[in-house]
Amino acid sequence: MTPEEYLQRREAAQEALWPKSDWMPGVKRLLDHLHAHDIPTAVATSSHQKLFAQKTANHTEAFGRFKHIVCGDDPRVAKTKPAPDCFLLAAQLLGAAPEDCLVFEDAPNGVQAAKAAGMAVVWIPHSFMLKEEDVANGVPLEAQEVVNEVGATQTLPSMEAFCPQDWGLPPY
């Protein structure tokens, strides 16, 4: 298979699967909570607009609540993650200082980008980075080396473990 064929197959698979994607556990609850308390939110993703639209197709109402969505192909984003550009642009659009922003990330490059932007970051690693027993215990040991390297402010096994009041937000 040539690289071009691989990319075509991958794109076809993404187009078929992304629209069927569901919320990660705890994410919808937090988004609804933030919206109910008029806490402004933004998305800062490395995904290009076309892919982001595919990923969020089943969730247009919820994603419509974000004040701003910054995608990786936005012309105002000079460099993608791990550069901080997309996070800094999202903060600017929200009218917020970077140090007043809280980022939720699932990838090490995103954690690095958020930290480089001067933002606090909660890292919820993809489950493939964790051992099954660690996920069950809420201890991402296999990811600890990456956590130490990128310096997430907090690491959680899932969004269900997030406590808003720990960050000065209204409790659930």
Image: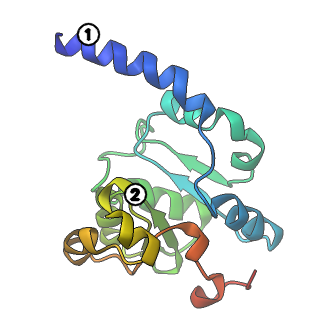
Label 2 SS? helix
Q: Is residue 76 left or right of residue 172?
A: left
Q: Position of residue 138 (x, y in %)?
A: 44, 77
Q: Looking at the figure, which quarter contains the C terminus?
A: bottom right
Question: What residue would you read off at disc 2?
Answer: 127
- Which of 101 and 95 lies nearest the eye of the viewer? 101
Q: Earlier in the sequence, mark 2 or mark 1?
A: 1
Mark 1 surroundings within 10 Å by alpha-carbon count, few (fewer than 14), some (14 through 19), many (20 or more): few
Residue 114: tell me if it is visible. Answer: no
Total marks shown come to 2
Q: Amino acid at mark 1?
A: Glu
Q: Position of residue 119 (x, y in %)?
A: 42, 75
Q: Is residue 25 left or right of residue 39?
A: left
Q: Position of residue 51 (x, y in %)?
A: 49, 30
Give the foreground label among 2 and 1.
2
Residue 140: tell me if it is visible. Answer: yes
Q: Is residue 69 left or right of residue 28?
A: left
Q: Amino acid at mark 2?
A: Ser
Label 1 SS? helix
Query: Can you say whether 45 is above or below 52 in the image?
Result: below
Mark 2 surroundings within 10 Å by alpha-carbon count, few (fewer than 14), some (14 through 19), many (20 or more): some
Question: What residue would you read off at disc 1?
Answer: 5
Query: Can you say whether 65 is above or below 124 in the image?
Result: above
Q: Position of residue 140 (x, y in %)?
A: 34, 73
- Within the image, what quadrant is residue 139 found in? bottom left
Query: Can you say whether 2 is above or below 168 in the image?
Result: above
Residue at image position (25%, 75%) is 144
